Image (cartoon, helix red, strand yellow):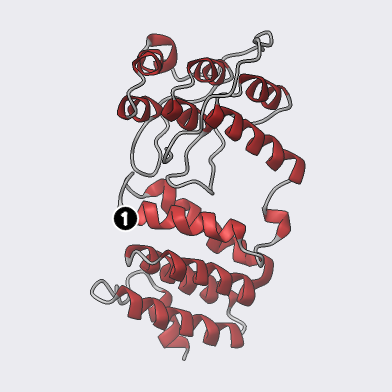
Amino acid sequence: AEEALALLADRRGPSFDSEPGLGANLLLQGAEVASRMGRSDAVTSLLQRALRLRCRDRDPRGAVGVVHAAFGLLGDEGRRVMESLEGLILSSPPGSPMALTAALAAGQVTEARWYPADLRGDPASRRRQERLYHGAETGDISAVYQALQDGADPNWRNLRAPGLPTPLMAAAFAGHLPVVQRLLAAGARPKALNCQGQTAAQLADDQGHPAVVALLSGPCALADRPRSGRSPAPRPAAPGPSPRGGP
């Protein structure tokens, strides 16, 4: 049993390239055996391999199941498998099936009832981030300004939205120029990519917003450096219509 577990857990062992679904099932079974043997290190390694296979197989539901199993078998240590899922999003080529599947799975995990509350972040902080994103998406400059003043992160990723967009991507997609200006002033990174491999400027270009594209392609934006200080509060602007689709 020890040798079989070691072989399954070793990345140099069977790759299951031709049958990723079958491989993931075997690894999950191995993780259950390792858990009964008290081998938490092997459990983590087996589940991380299973997670990668589920994402390679374009199976977000299966990937969510692996993370669920991790918290069931490892308790709080299951967060290490969740961190692996987030790592897949960042390390996979933008727009690749692996990145898109991992992103979709991550969004579903954070919404699951079984996901530990302490990993969801501080409720007040989460509300600030959600207000910032909603303001960016709808063009509510006052809401954006207030959320930033309250400490919201302009480079936060919305795990609930396809592609894991930032507030800047949402504002650029919808063509809200004043919001884009404010987010850039707050340190939003214009070179950041969504899971489809698109920048905020490319999203704006796709939606026909040349003024936003020009701003995001200019020298100030391309410097891609956070700016210090806070600008005075802008005059409130009427919220724009919600865009169809999403970044």
Q: Position of residue 230 (x, y in %)?
A: 67, 12
Q: Which residue appears farthest toward the bottom when viewing the image?
A: 1
Question: Residue visible at 69% across and 27% down?
Answer: 147
Q: Is residue 56 above or below residue 164?
A: below
Residue type, numbered disc 1: Pro
Q: Quadrant of the C terminus?
A: top left
Q: Position of residue 199 (x, y in %)?
A: 37, 30
On screen, residue 231 versus residue 92, left or right, reads right
Please give the residue where the numbered disc 1 appears in the rendered image.
97
Query: Considering the numbered disc 1 on the image, is that residue within a helix, a strand or a loop?
Result: helix
Q: Position of residue 84 (x, y in %)?
A: 49, 58
Question: Residue visible at 43% across and 24% down?
Answer: 190
Would you identify the image quadrant in which residue 97 lies? bottom left
Question: Residue visible at 45% across and 34% down?
Answer: 243
Q: Nearer the viewer, residue 4 or 163?
A: 163
Question: Residue visible at 40% across and 83% down?
Answer: 26
Q: Nearer the viewer, residue 208 or 90?
A: 208
Q: Is residue 62 above or below residue 197?
A: below
Q: Is residue 214 above or below residue 203?
A: above
Query: Alpha-carbon neighbours of circle 1 within 10 Å: few (<14), some, or many (≥20)?
Result: some
Q: Is residue 28 above or below residue 137?
A: below
Q: Which residue appears farthest toward the left when viewing the image?
A: 18
Q: How many marks?
A: 1
Would you identify the image quadrant in which residue 35 lies? bottom right
Q: Position of residue 74 (x, y in %)?
A: 63, 73
On screen, residue 12 versus residue 121, left or right, reads left
